[in-house]
Amino acid sequence: IEEQMNTAIRYRRNWAGSNTMVRVSREVVEVFLHGNHIASVDTATNNLTLFDGGWQSNTTKSRLNALLSEMVQQFPLYQV
């Protein structure tokens, strides 16, 4: 799922699989988990904004870590 999510983000394509969705608009790629907005990528600047949507679940952390590994690679996400 996460590899497919990252591929959709990389190629700026709408995609949905299982509980995860990538939605592309003009200059923003948004990622949703169970309908909750968990990330945005500004395609003009490649700025990544992360949200937990109020859910600090293992799945949310896994999706956010996958996004981080795709975008910045050296910053893993840990919950404290």
Image: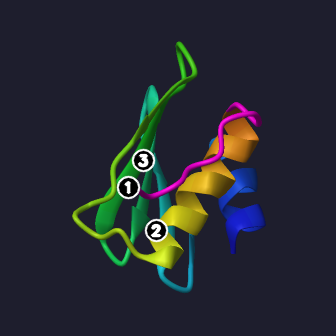
Q: Which residue is mark 3?
A: 39
For the residues labelled 1 and 2, say whether their Cβ atoms are less than 8 Å apart: yes
Find residue 60 and name its label.
Answer: 2
Name the residue located 77 percent from the left edge and 63 percent from the top edge.
3
Q: Residue furthest bottom?
A: 18
Q: Position of residue 75 (x, y in %)?
A: 66, 36
38 lies left or right of 13: left
Between 41 and 60, the one nearer to me in the picture: 60
Residue range highlighted in magenta: 72-80
Q: Which residue is mark 1?
A: 38
For the residues labelled 3 and 1, say whether their Cβ atoms are less than 8 Å apart: yes
As measured in the structure, the alpha-carbon distance from the residue carrying label 3 to the one carrying label 1 is 4 Å
Q: Which mark is in front, 3 or 2? A: 2
Query: Mark 2 or mark 1, which is nearer the start of the sequence?
Result: 1
Q: Is residue 75 above or below residue 18?
A: above
Q: Identify which amino acid the numbered label 3 is placed on.
A: Ala
Between 8 and 19, the one nearer to me in the picture: 19
Name the residue located 40 percent from the left edge and 56 percent from the top edge.
80
Q: Residues within 10 Å of mark 3 (few under 14, many from 20)?
A: many
As measured in the structure, the alpha-carbon distance from the residue carrying label 1 to the one carrying label 2 is 8 Å
Q: Identify which amino acid the numbered label 1 is placed on.
A: Ile
